[in-house]
Image: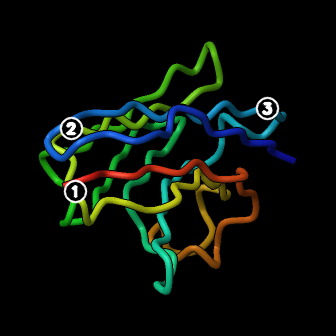
Amino acid sequence: QVQLAESGGGLVQAGGSLRLSCAASGRTFSSSVIGWFRQAPGKNREFVVRINVLGGTINYAESVKGRFTISRDNAKNTVYLQMNSLKPEDTAVYYCAAKSANIGSYYDPTYYNYWGQGTQVTVSS
Protein backbone atom coordinates (compact mmCIF):
# COMPACT_ATOMS: atom_id res chain seq x y z
CA GLN A 1 0.00 0.00 0.00
CA VAL A 2 1.15 3.51 -0.81
CA GLN A 3 -0.58 6.66 0.38
CA LEU A 4 0.04 9.89 -1.50
CA ALA A 5 -0.64 13.53 -0.70
CA GLU A 6 0.02 16.43 -3.06
CA SER A 7 0.60 20.03 -2.09
CA GLY A 8 1.88 23.23 -3.63
CA GLY A 9 -0.73 24.13 -6.20
CA GLY A 10 -2.06 27.63 -6.62
CA LEU A 11 -2.64 30.57 -8.92
CA VAL A 12 0.28 31.99 -10.87
CA GLN A 13 0.72 34.29 -13.84
CA ALA A 14 1.99 32.99 -17.14
CA GLY A 15 5.76 32.68 -17.05
CA GLY A 16 5.76 32.03 -13.33
CA SER A 17 6.77 28.98 -11.32
CA LEU A 18 5.30 26.58 -8.82
CA ARG A 19 6.67 23.56 -7.02
CA LEU A 20 4.42 20.65 -6.26
CA SER A 21 5.20 18.05 -3.65
CA CYS A 22 4.00 14.47 -3.40
CA ALA A 23 4.51 12.97 0.03
CA ALA A 24 4.31 9.20 0.06
CA SER A 25 4.00 6.65 2.80
CA GLY A 26 3.99 2.90 2.68
CA ARG A 27 6.41 0.02 2.57
CA THR A 28 6.51 -0.26 -1.21
CA PHE A 29 7.48 3.35 -1.97
CA SER A 30 11.08 2.52 -2.80
CA SER A 31 10.05 0.02 -5.48
CA SER A 32 7.53 2.30 -7.11
CA VAL A 33 7.24 4.52 -10.10
CA ILE A 34 5.80 7.91 -9.16
CA GLY A 35 4.02 9.71 -11.93
CA TRP A 36 2.49 13.14 -12.23
CA PHE A 37 -0.66 13.45 -14.28
CA ARG A 38 -2.96 16.37 -14.91
CA GLN A 39 -6.56 16.79 -15.88
CA ALA A 40 -8.10 19.93 -17.27
CA PRO A 41 -11.88 20.44 -17.35
CA GLY A 42 -13.48 18.39 -20.09
CA LYS A 43 -10.25 16.61 -20.94
CA ASN A 44 -8.78 13.20 -20.22
CA ARG A 45 -6.15 12.75 -17.58
CA GLU A 46 -2.77 13.11 -19.25
CA PHE A 47 0.74 12.02 -18.40
CA VAL A 48 3.17 14.73 -17.35
CA VAL A 49 6.28 13.01 -16.01
CA ARG A 50 7.41 9.95 -14.12
CA ILE A 51 10.34 8.91 -12.00
CA ASN A 52 11.45 5.48 -10.93
CA VAL A 53 12.05 5.96 -7.23
CA LEU A 54 14.82 3.38 -6.96
CA GLY A 55 16.74 3.85 -10.16
CA GLY A 56 15.88 7.44 -10.96
CA THR A 57 14.76 6.90 -14.56
CA ILE A 58 12.76 9.91 -15.71
CA ASN A 59 10.46 10.49 -18.66
CA TYR A 60 8.68 13.75 -19.50
CA ALA A 61 5.76 14.51 -21.77
CA GLU A 62 6.87 16.56 -24.75
CA SER A 63 4.62 19.42 -23.68
CA VAL A 64 6.59 20.01 -20.47
CA LYS A 65 10.14 19.12 -21.47
CA GLY A 66 12.56 21.87 -20.62
CA ARG A 67 10.08 23.58 -18.30
CA PHE A 68 9.25 20.99 -15.65
CA THR A 69 11.71 19.09 -13.49
CA ILE A 70 10.95 16.10 -11.32
CA SER A 71 13.12 15.12 -8.39
CA ARG A 72 12.95 12.89 -5.37
CA ASP A 73 14.10 12.86 -1.79
CA ASN A 74 14.05 9.22 -0.77
CA ALA A 75 14.85 10.05 2.84
CA LYS A 76 11.64 12.06 3.00
CA ASN A 77 9.62 9.76 0.71
CA THR A 78 8.77 12.83 -1.32
CA VAL A 79 8.74 13.59 -5.01
CA TYR A 80 8.81 17.16 -6.26
CA LEU A 81 7.66 18.73 -9.49
CA GLN A 82 9.27 22.07 -10.24
CA MET A 83 7.24 23.86 -12.89
CA ASN A 84 8.79 26.86 -14.60
CA SER A 85 7.69 29.04 -17.51
CA LEU A 86 4.10 28.11 -16.84
CA LYS A 87 1.54 28.61 -19.56
CA PRO A 88 -2.25 28.98 -19.37
CA GLU A 89 -2.55 25.56 -21.00
CA ASP A 90 -0.82 24.05 -17.96
CA THR A 91 -3.94 24.84 -15.94
CA ALA A 92 -5.30 21.60 -14.51
CA VAL A 93 -5.66 19.51 -11.42
CA TYR A 94 -2.34 17.78 -10.89
CA TYR A 95 -2.22 14.32 -9.41
CA CYS A 96 0.66 12.19 -8.27
CA ALA A 97 0.25 8.47 -8.59
CA ALA A 98 2.22 5.32 -7.84
CA LYS A 99 2.56 1.95 -9.48
CA SER A 100 4.89 -1.00 -9.28
CA ALA A 101 7.96 -0.49 -11.40
CA ASN A 102 7.56 -3.66 -13.43
CA ILE A 103 3.91 -3.39 -14.33
CA GLY A 104 2.48 -1.60 -17.33
CA SER A 105 3.35 1.53 -19.22
CA TYR A 106 4.51 4.56 -17.24
CA TYR A 107 2.42 6.97 -19.33
CA ASP A 108 -0.87 5.09 -18.96
CA PRO A 109 -2.83 6.17 -15.86
CA THR A 110 -4.73 2.88 -15.77
CA TYR A 111 -1.61 1.08 -14.50
CA TYR A 112 -1.28 3.31 -11.46
CA ASN A 113 -2.84 1.80 -8.36
CA TYR A 114 -2.54 4.66 -5.94
CA TRP A 115 -3.51 8.30 -6.37
CA GLY A 116 -3.36 11.46 -4.37
CA GLN A 117 -6.31 13.79 -4.00
CA GLY A 118 -4.99 16.27 -6.55
CA THR A 119 -3.93 19.90 -6.34
CA GLN A 120 -5.20 22.71 -8.53
CA VAL A 121 -2.77 24.67 -10.68
CA THR A 122 -4.16 27.75 -12.40
CA VAL A 123 -2.06 29.84 -14.77
CA SER A 124 -3.49 33.19 -15.76
CA SER A 125 -2.62 34.91 -19.00
Q: Position of residue 124 (x, y in %)?
A: 27, 52
Going from N to C along the chain, the mark reached first, 3 or 2, is 3
Amino acid on which disc 2 is placed: Asn
Q: Nearer the viewer, residue 116 or 75?
A: 116
Which circle marks residue 47 in the picture? none
Q: Position of residue 23 (x, y in %)?
A: 66, 30
Which circle marks residue 84 in the picture? 2
Gap between marks 2 and 1 measured at Cα: 9 Å
Report the residue at 63% width, 69% height from top: 103
Going from N to C along the chain, the mark reached first, 2 or 1, is 1
Q: Nearer the viewer, mark 2 or mark 1?
A: 2
Count neighbours of disc 3 (C-alpha within 10 A) and say few if under 14, some if 14 to 19, many if 20 or more: some
Report the residue at 66% width, 58% height from top: 99
Q: Is residue 117 left or right of residue 73?
A: right
Amino acid on which disc 1 is placed: Val
Q: Nearer the viewer, mark 3 or mark 1?
A: 1
Q: Is residue 109 left or right of residue 117?
A: left
Amino acid on which disc 3 is placed: Ser
Report the residue at 17% width, 53% height from top: 65
Going from N to C along the chain, the mark reached first, 3 or 1, is 3
Gap between marks 3 and 1 measured at Cα: 27 Å
Residue occupied by mark 3: 25
Q: Are marks 2 and 1 in contact (CB under 8 Å)?
A: no
Residue occupied by mark 1: 64
Quadrant of the rendered structure where residue 6 is? top right
As helix, strand or loop, the secondary structure at mark 2 comes to loop
